Amino acid sequence: MSTETRVINIDGMTCGGCVKSVDSALTQLDGVQSVEVDLEGNKASVTYDSSAVAVDAIVEAIEEAGFDAVVAGE
């Protein structure tokens, strides 16, 4: 298992419901171990098994939940 933690910048979150949507979308992915969504910082810290899920799939899940997402530093 290859555990990584990445910060994903997220645009469009405005309330606690948005946080729940992002959290729910990510925790449903196989390989995601933990998610911490920061509404004020407009970001999520995601710890995942990179051999089970790609960071691109994490970004895609956030976008499918209705938000713009990009890996911090990329």
Image (cartoon, grey):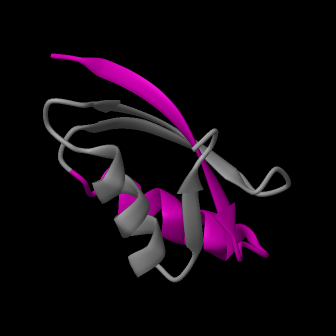
Total marks in image: 0
- Specify the quadrant of the image occupied by residue 48: top left
Q: Is residue 74 above or below residue 21?
A: above
Which residue is drawn at the image coordinates 71% and 68% (left, top)?
16
Residue 69 picture quarter: bottom right
Question: In the displayed structure, would residue 47 be above or below residue 70?
Answer: above
Q: Is residue 64 above or below residue 11?
A: below
Instruction: Identify the residue at horizontal 39%, vertical 79% (top origin).
Output: 64
Which residue reaches farthest front?
Answer: 74
Question: Can residue 37 be seen by looking at this rendering?
Answer: no
Where does the N terminus fall, quadrant-wise?
A: top left
In the figure, is residue 72 to the left or right of 41?
A: left
Picture coordinates of residue 28, whole percent (x, y): 27, 57
Q: Is residue 22 shown to the viewer in this render? A: yes
Which is nearer the eye, 54 or 73?
73
Quadrant location of the C terminus in the rendered image: top right
Please tell me whether residue 23 belongs to the stretch shown in magenta.
Answer: yes
| Residue located at (36% from left, 67% from top) | 60
Coordinates of residue 17 in the picture (x, y in percent): 64, 75
Residue 63: x and y in percent read 46, 74
- Left or right? Give the position of 48 relative to 71: left
Q: Which residues are magenta?
A: 1-29
Spot the residue most to the right: 40
Image point 30% across, 19% down: which residue?
Answer: 3
Q: Position of residue 46 (x, y in %)?
A: 48, 38
Q: Nearer the viewer, residue 52 or 35?
A: 52
